[in-house]
């Protein structure tokens, strides 16, 4: 008995069916991965890192070489970040610069000071457990040694970062 092979026509038909099977497997895989992306998504909080970077930027702006001349020191009019430092879009930040020298003190503040009392609310861990991701990022004050008019001083910078809306 002689067995006939399918020949070229059978091979073409089989490859066309393989394309359909492959397409169906790809659709199922994308569906599974798409559902998995929503299930395994997680929240990454970078506000503390933003606060550190912003504080360093403010320090470099006010005293780029560690020296401060009081004649060029900006006034505390609430806009020193934009007018003096040239930072745009700093609405999410509250920055306080406290310059201490020779028993004197100059303070610059900009931003919403409401962030400070909002942070106080979040100190109670039990009450705010469900809304932790809305806690503003805070930077413990960083102290930079500076020379103020040639004399030793310190610049203390505090930054609070509001969550993005």
Image (cartoon, grey):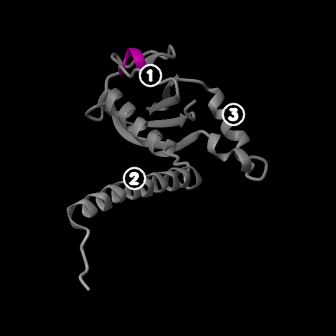
> Which residue carries the number 3 mark?
117
Which residue occupies 56% across, 49% down? 38
User: How many C-alpha atoms fall within 10 Å of the one at disc 1: few (<14), some, or many (≥20)?
Assistant: few
Q: Who comes first in sequence, dot 2 or dot 1?
A: 2
* 1 or 3: mark nearer the eye: 1
The answer to whether mark 2 and mark 3 are in CB contact below 8 A is no
Q: Who comes first in sequence, dot 2 or dot 3?
A: 2
Specify the label residue 23 is tagged with.
Answer: 2
Q: Is residue 84 magenta?
A: yes
Could you say whether the residue bearing mark 1 is in a helix, strand or loop?
A: loop
Q: What secondary structure characterizes most of the magenta part?
A: helix
> Which residue carries the number 1 mark?
89
Specify the label residue 73 is tagged with.
Answer: none
In the picture, measured across the screen, residue 70 lies left or right of residue 11, that is right
Q: Is 138 drawn above or below residue 89 in the view shown?
A: below
Find the distance from the CA under tag 2 to the CA under tag 3.
57 Å
Q: Position of residue 104 (x, y in %)?
A: 49, 28
Q: Quadrant of the C terminus?
A: top right
Q: Who comes first in sequence, dot 1 or dot 3?
A: 1
Which residue occupies 28% across, 63% down? 10
Magenta-colored span = 81-85
The answer to whether mark 1 and mark 3 are in CB contact below 8 A is no
Which residue occupies 24% across, 75% down? 4
Which residue occupies 74% across, 46% down? 128
Could you say whether the residue bearing mark 3 is in a helix, strand or loop?
A: helix
Farthest right residue in view: 127
């Amino acid at each position: 008995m002689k067995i006939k092979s399918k020949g070229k026509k059978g091979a073409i038909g089989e490859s066309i069916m393989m394309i359909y099977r492959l397409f169906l497997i790809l659709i199922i895989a994308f569906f599974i991965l798409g559902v998995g992306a929503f299930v395994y998504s997680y929240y990454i909080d970078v506000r503390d890192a933003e606060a550190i970077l912003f504080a360093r930027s403010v320090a470099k702006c006010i005293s780029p070489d560690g020296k401060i001349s009081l004649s060029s020191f900006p006034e505390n009019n609430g806009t020193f970040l934009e007018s003096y430092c040239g930072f745009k879009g700093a609405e999410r930040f509250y920055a306080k610069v406290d310059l201490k020298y020779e028993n004197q003190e100059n303070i610059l503040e900009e931003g919403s000071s409401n962030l400070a009392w909002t942070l106080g609310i979040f100190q109670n861990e039990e009450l705010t457990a469900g809304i932790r991701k809305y806690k503003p990022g805070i930077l413990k004050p960083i102290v930079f040694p500076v020379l103020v008019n040639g004399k030793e001083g310190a610049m203390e910078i505090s930054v609070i970062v509001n969550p993005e809306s």
